[in-house]
Image (cartoon, helix red, strand yellow):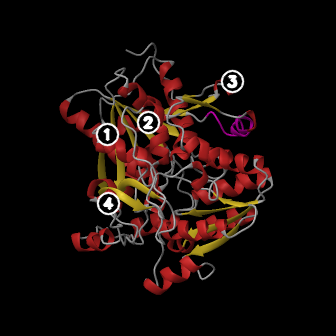
Amino acid sequence: MAKQPIPYKTYLSEEEIPRQWYNLNAAMKKKHEPFLNPATLKACSADDLKPVFCDDCVEQELNMTDLYVDIPEEIRDFYKMYRPSPLVRAYCLEKALGTPAEIYYKLEGNNTSGSHKLNSAVAQAYYAKKQGLKSVTTETGAGQWGTALSMATAYFGLDLIVYMVKVSSEQKPHRKEVMRTYGAQVIPSPSDTTAAGRKILAEFPGTGGSLGCAISEAVEKAVTSDSCRYVLGSVLDHVILHQSIIGLESKAALDKYGITPDLVIGCVGGGSNYGGLIAPFMGDKIAGKNETEFIGVEPASCPSLTRGKFVYDFCDSAKITPLAKMYTLGCGFMPAPNHAGGLRYHGMSPIVSELYHEGLMRAVAVEQSKVFEAAEYFARTEGILPAPESSHAIRVAIDEALKCKETGKKKRILFGLTGTGYFDMSAYKQYNDGTMKDYIPTDEDLAKGFASIPDIPQNK
């Protein structure tokens, strides 16, 4: 029972910005399998990871014991520019649907990057600066991560090279200009600036690229450059740690009204926003403190959870990164050039993969036409133009609310609105023009990707 009706928007005070991140790794009874060194096939040590990632991030990546990790004050100071972000009760959407469900969403698009990505970008840029590095490299799919990181590196005075998935750079030229405005160098990927890029171009002429391709190029550039490290916007444990601020703020806002969500829904590509949103709620579920259900929503065009294999695979297309035990379509899988944006990744976070494998969450795959149908409905009822990625969660939140209408059962639904869609107008144009097509890989398409999964003893 709620203590009082929740207002349209609930804001925490500046003082209520969390002082610690929540480490979902520590809450999990069954930990995910360790990353493997591709040369030795042994568990990666800190020394294996430090040539690629910032030292503090490596320490966080390997931390399986501390439930809470302190947020440095310099990062909290940056957070104060745009956090706490509002928790919104979707009264207008509820009314339009005629559902007894209560729908809440955590709005993460209220910053210039337009998404949740800034939460980890500022942390990783801070740690790079603290370490005395001069530059960092990264990849970006839809552009939110590259935009966020360019803002963070500008703030801390670091150089940045962004490898942007080629099809996204073509669909969203203005995203590139925002990154350049903040001082980043942006290179469409795959490119001829790296050996990995040239190899991929030779194997897949005319490809629109993928996050796996862009990761390969960014990692190669980092390890062959002086005073430089690679920073990743999703997948890894330390990124989910940073993104746990989303879930912590959501829980704190709901706690004010005595509300525990029955359903928590988020879009999943690499898994960072979803892992961050569910973190404290999932920790409570594991501890037997709630009966919340969790749903991860992925594009039908890149269905790593719903149609992938739970095996060790490379995190990049050129097979130069450590191996992760995850649900994957194979590092050689090339997704269709659709508008799933940052969700076009062949694998899934090891944390999210383990939770799914243990049956602690379920997954749903949706076609992009249905995603944009939900996006348009949400825009017309709630007045916010959502990002395509976020709209995957909106689609399933609406579907679940309609189930409540059919059954008459009231549920409290929380979903993550990870960002706004104002750089995605070419996608909205296709939907409005009726030219949008749904891309669903056939079993034969998936078989080609599965063939790229490494044949190692751990996968037997």
User: Reading the chain from its start, which is encountered first: label 4 or label 1?
Assistant: 1
Q: CA distance from mark 3 to mark 2?
A: 22 Å
Residue identified by numbered label 1: 361
Query: In the displayed structure, would residue 29 be above or below residue 54?
Result: above
Chain-order first, disc 3 or disc 2:
3
Residue receiving disc 3: 15
Q: State which tag comes first along the sequence, 4 or 2.
A: 2
Q: Is residue 230 left or right of residue 358?
A: right
Which of the two residues, 460 or 335, is positioned nearer the viewer here?
460
Residue at disc 1, secondary structure: loop
Q: Position of residue 53 (x, y in %)?
A: 63, 54
Q: Farthest left residue?
A: 407
Query: What's under tag 1, amino acid-wise?
Result: Met
Residue beneath label 2, please?
278
Q: Callout 1: 10 Å neighbours few (<14), some, many (20+)? A: some
Q: For the residues marked 4 and 1, what is the alpha-carbon distance in whole angstroms?
A: 28 Å
Which numbered disc, 1 or 3, marks the residue closer to the eye? 1
Secondary structure beneath disc 3? helix
Q: Position of residue 439 (x, y in %)?
A: 32, 69
Q: Given the image, on which type of amino acid does mark 2 rest?
A: Ile
Query: Closest to the observer: 88 or 156?
Result: 156
Q: Which residues are magenta?
A: 75-84
Q: Are marks 1 and 2 in contact (CB under 8 Å)?
A: yes
Residue 304: quadrant of the picture: bottom left
Rendered view: 31 above or below 121: above
Q: Secondary structure at mark 2?
A: helix
Quadrant occupied by the C terminus: bottom left
Distance of label 1 from label 2 (alpha carbons):
10 Å
Judging from the image, what secondary structure is the residue with disc 4 in? helix
Q: Residue at x 64, y 24 (%)?
A: 16
| Disc nearest the viewer among 3 and 2 | 2
